Image (cartoon, helix red, strand yellow):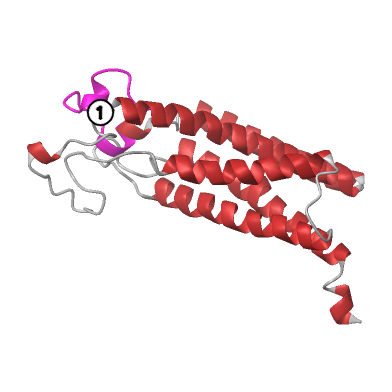
């Protein structure tokens, strides 16, 4: 009986819901907050100390995890329903979100070269010869600017779409009002964190967080990266 209880459609659908809430409802918003407001860590001696790796490592790990795990979660729903079904708005929206997630991983691969006075894996900031500084990011090439515009805009669009999919899922499951209230509280917490960290002036452009404020860096000679 225990095996039946833990392999039936009901259990699988609950598992699907838990996976999607954890990935698109919690991990994605958390990743966005970290990426936007923690390029410079609390206590970091900025701008003398630059290029904290925390936000990028977190962003990469969380984004990749979300896409792979939520794809598995979508597969769990397909298994529970004995096949792919787009009968509901939630199913259509959820499928689109997973596809957008994979698109984000592909877009991220188009970022171009890094460049700069020191390498990505150079914790001692040993300066390279100046003729080795060129990179799409460091020099803010057209490729990099296009990448940032697309990646940032579609990233937020995908995150919002994910939260909408969760809302539609809650409605479709017919969950009681405490679940609606709990998810509403989560959304409020995300918006509040954006407001709070914005007021604290925690937002530092990526370019300046990595290379500092010196005008010798090409991206600081005009409006640089906003990511």
Q: Is residue 24 left or right of residue 77?
A: left
Dividing the image into 4 quarters, which one contains the C terminus? Answer: top left
Answer with the quarter of the image where residue 117 lies: top left
* Residue 64 at least partly seen: yes
| Position in image of residue 104 (x %, y %) | 52, 41
Q: Is residue 35 left or right of residue 96?
A: left
Judging from the image, what secondary structure is the residue with disc 1 in?
A: loop
Which of 202 and 32 lies nearest the eye of the viewer?
A: 32
The residue positioned 23% from the left and 19% from the top of the image is 221
> Which corner quadrant of the image does residue 109 belong to?
top left
The magenta segment = 208-227
**Location of residue 44 (image quadrant):** top left
Callout 1 crowding tier (Cα within 10 Å): few <14, some 14–19, many ≥20 = some
- What secondary structure is the stretch in magenta mostly built from? loop
For the residue pair 164 and 29, the one nearer the viewer reads as: 164
Q: Is residue 161 left or right of residue 210?
A: right
Say left or right for 220 vs 23: left
Per the image, the residue denoted by label 1 is: 213
């Amino acid at each position: 009986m225990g095996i039946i209880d833990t392999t039936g459609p009901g259990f699988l659908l609950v598992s699907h819901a838990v996976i999607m809430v954890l990935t698109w409802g919690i991990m994605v918003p958390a990743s966005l907050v970290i990426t936007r407001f923690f390029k410079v860590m609390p206590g970091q001696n900025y701008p003398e100390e630059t290029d904290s790796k925390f936000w990028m490592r977190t962003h990469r790990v969380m984004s990749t995890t979300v896409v792979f795990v939520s794809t598995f979660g979508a597969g769990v729903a397909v298994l529970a329903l004995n096949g792919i079904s787009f009968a509901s708005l939630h199913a259509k929206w959820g499928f689109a979100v997973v596809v957008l997630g994979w698109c984000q991983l592909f877009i991220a691969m188009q970022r171009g070269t890094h460049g700069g006075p020191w390498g990505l894996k150079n914790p001692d900031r040993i300066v390279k010869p100046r003729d080795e500084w060129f990179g799409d990011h460091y020099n803010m090439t057209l490729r990099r600017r296009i990448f940032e515009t697309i990646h940032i805009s579609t990233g937020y669009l995908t995150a919002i779409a994910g939260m909408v999919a969760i809302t539609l899922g809650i409605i479709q499951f017919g969950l009681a009002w405490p679940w609606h209230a709990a998810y509403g509280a989560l959304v409020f917490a995300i918006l509040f964190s954006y407001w709070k960290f914005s007021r604290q002036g925690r937002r530092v452009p990526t370019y300046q967080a990595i290379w500092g404020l010196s005008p010798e860096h090409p991206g600081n000679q005009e409006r640089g990266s906003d990511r």
